[in-house]
Every structure is written in C-alpha cells, then in structure tokens.
Amino acid sequence: MSMGQEVRYRVRGGRPLQGTAFIQGAKNAVLPMIGASLLASKGRTVLRNVPIIEDVRRALELAQAIGAKVEFHEPERTLVIDASELTSPVLPAEIARRFRGSVLFVPALLHRLGSAVIEGVGGCNLGSRNLDFHYRGFARLGSEVSEDELNNVINITVGRLAGAHLYLDTPSHTGTENLIMAAALTPGTTVIENAALEPEVLDVINFLTRMGARISGGGTGFITVEGVSELTAVEHTIMPDRIDAGVFAMAAAATGGEISLVGAHLEHLGVARWKLEQMGVEFTQQGAVLHVRRESPLRPINAVTCPYPGFATDLQSPLMALACLAGGESYIREDIYDGRFALVDELNKMGAKIEVERSRAIVHGPMQLRGTEVIAHDLRTGVSLVLAGLVAEGETVVAPGYLVDRGHAHLAERLSALGADITREMI
Ligand SMILES: CC(=O)N[C@H]1[C@@H](OP(=O)(O)OP(=O)(O)OC[C@H]2O[C@@H](n3ccc(=O)[nH]c3=O)[C@H](O)[C@@H]2O)O[C@H](CO)[C@@H](O)[C@@H]1O
Ligand SMILES: C=C(OP(=O)(O)O)C(=O)O
C-alpha cells in the first residue's frame, strides 16, 4: 500500500511519441469482476490481463478483509481469487473510503453472509456522486438498507429476496453492474430498465454468464436476469481499457507522434473516436492493434459528455488538455460530474486559456504550455496534466501521483518506451 509514501510525476515536454504501447486491462471491468468473483462459493477464479493499478490493490485488500484468499501474480497480470470462505460482512473504512468500487462487494456479502456493512465509500473526488440507485435496487430486491449518517455507515440486510422490476433514472455504470450481480442469485426474474451500455458492463455480463448467471439484453438498455441458485468460479480475460487507450491516442496526437496501441479497439471509444478524427487524428485498426497518428495541425472541437456510446466523461479531461493545442476555440460541456473542471485552473497555471461557466468550458487555442508544479485533483486530472507536460516547455511536476496510479499501470515506463521524458518519483 503506497499510503504514507508520496508519488509524483516529473515530465519534460517536447518529444513526439513513437513506437508501441501496451494497453492495460480495463479498470472499470476488473473492479466489478473482483466483486463478482466473490459470488462463487466454490473453487478459484482466475482473472487475466489485470491492470497493475492502485484501485485493484485496494479491491484485493478489501476482498481479503472479508475473508477471500487472493493471489496477485503481477508479472503474469493474473489474479487468483478463492472466495469459498467469506468471514466478515464489514467493508472497513480505511480501505473502502479510498476507492468507490467497494460498493461492488455488496451483492456477494448479501448472498453469501446475509448482510453488508459499508463504512464509507470513496472514489475520485468529482463533486456530488450518489449511490442511491444501488441502494434502492438492493431494497427492491428484498434487502433492508439503513444509514447511520452520523458515523457514515450503511447497513444492508437480506430479507425475503425476490426478482423485481428496476428502473435507473440515468444509466449508471456501476449501478447496472451491481444490480445485475445482486439479481444473479436472487430467485425469480429481475428487469433493469435504462441500463448502462458501456463495453465494460458487457464484459462483466460475459464473465457472469460464464459463471452460470442467466442474463439477457446486455447492450440494449433493457436487461433481464433470471436468478440461479449458484455461480461457479471461472477464468476470464479482462477487456482492454478504452480510457487508457484514449489517453495514449491523445498523447500521440498532442506530441505529433505516431504510435501503435496493442489491444486497443476503435469501437470501444464510441463518440471519442469521431471527435479525435475531427481534430485531425488518424486511426487505423489493424486487427487487435490500433495505429494512431496526427495527420494535420489540431483543429478545435465541441464535445458533450454522455453515457456510452457518447463522449466518455473520463476522456473529457485529456480532451481539454489536447484542445489547448488546437487552432481555435473548443467548447466542452461536462454533464456527468460537477467536479471535473478542477483541471482548468491547473492547465491555466501552465499557460492555457480556458474559461468556465457552470458546466461549460471554452478552451482558447493554440497555446504554448509551460511546465510548472500542478495538482492532480483526481485520476483523470492527473493523467491529463501528464499529457500536457509532454508538450509543455520545460518541466511539469504532477502530484499526488497516487491518483494517477489509481487507474493507469506503469504510466511512466510505457510513455518512456515511446520516447517521452518522464519519471515517477517517490518522495
Ligand atoms: C468504477 C467505475 O466503473 N467507474 C466509472 C463509472 O462510475 P460510476 O458507475 O460511479 O458512475 P455512474 O454512471 O454511476 O454515475 C453517473 C452519474 O449518475 C449519478 N448517480 C449514479 C448512481 C446513483 O445511484 N445515483 C446517481 O445519481 C452520479 O452521481 C453521476 O453524476 O462510470 C463513470 C461514468 O462513465 C466513470 O466516470 C467512472 O470511471
Ligand atoms: C471516476 C473514476 O473512477 P471511480 O469511479 O473509480 O472514482 C474514473 O475512472 O475516472
């Protein structure tokens, strides 16, 4: 655990990226899958292509805290999870508050131990982020949910579980995954309307289906789950991380480079693909390798964040950094998180000219960015500042690096392999 030891990234700009980058397994698929693997009461689950990121480490600490046996074979990027004996329903605060994926452990605790206690859920600080769809869904499936606001503890206890008709007010990504997991072992039929369409949700459905769950309608927004009595431990290879791929593609575009992204798939990028093409990025999918280069000076762009296949909010921050380099005014609207624009002040410290009015930002380009010390307020802010550092004059220092390490594996090594001048320092 890297708590106590500070990490920072030091980047010196000006080198075009060239070569091959390996895209990591998807953070937002592996976290629910670790939660899902705890639903199996027998055998050992094997997950492959696991990203070596801090959120995975936190998830494994949490799995161990409730009694699962976990082996993380990092060089093989393989996780082996034995959840045959879960011993405690408590998701302890010191781990749970450091990452939001902790809520994905609730279905396993409910089905295996009959109750779950969450001592405070964390995650990236992105303004107001509710989990009401999760709790209302658990309640509709027959659990009792109570909140001790004073101590920031949520207690969930199983009552008479039965399938139900669930409707999400917005297509919540983890909400959809969590309710599918809860429904998978709940007797009867559960319907989830307005379900999320993200590729990671489909990967989680594939994994659960292999475990024996009966799920139909993935990718349609209308999911039906027929409860089964048992799920079994299986092997699964995690899909590539489309946000990691998007960041690398934008880094190539920013520096005027040309790179191959091993394992990246254009169709996973959704609208981000078309936006980057409009800006002057050329993509060529060559089987399972995505080739990226900047084919013209960068043009400005309009983007509005939206659930998949719309423009991903997790790519909005790096897009803002890229837009600083485009010739003209870009317009960005953030409709998912009210805290994402913490990046603006940091980019402006580097010489960018970005104006914000509520959820809208106007980026005036092109600007020559200058290196300085900047703050990673969250994971995507952090990686976007690294991206800005790759084209800035002089040296950019991004801290706290922990937030970058929450979601990107071996970032400094992978960018260095493309010719970037970047180091990860422990202080
Ligand atoms: C671990 C993981 O997969 N994280 C991703 C997931 O987060 P996460 O699953 O938390 O995001 P959601 O799709 O649930 O949230 C989107 C919006 O819906 C709101 N909401 C959500 C649930 C709820 O019960 N009530 C409610 O009001 C949130 O406050 C937020 O404004 O999708 C986000 C949106 O693509 C990504 O940025 C995150 O990287
Ligand atoms: C918001 C993010 O993650 P989390 O949901 O884990 O906080 C993210 O990946 O940018």
Image: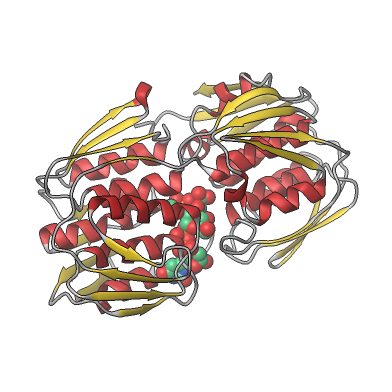
Q: What residue appears at the point 51 percent right and 42 percent down from the top-left corner?
A: 241
**Residue sitting nearer the eye, 270 or 336:** 270
For residue 215, which quarter of the picture? bottom left
For residue 265, which quarter of the picture? top right
Q: What residue appears at the point 63 percent right and 42 percent down from the top-left corner?
A: 246
- How many numbered circles are shown? 0
- Expressed as whole percent of the image width and height from the top left, the position of residue 354 reads 79, 53
- Expressed as whole percent of the image width and height from the top left, the position of residue 389 reads 71, 32
17, above or below 40, in the image: above
Q: Is residue 211 left or right of residue 205?
A: left
- Expressed as whole percent of the image width and height from the top left, the position of residue 86 reads 12, 48
For residue 142, which quarter of the picture? bottom left
The answer to whether residue 342 is seen in the rendering is yes
The answer to whether residue 124 is seen in the rendering is no
Q: What residue appears at the point 85 percent right and 36 percent down from the top-left corner?
A: 368
135, above or below 47, in the image: below
Q: Residue furthest front?
A: 287
**Residue sitting nearer the eye, 144 or 4:** 144
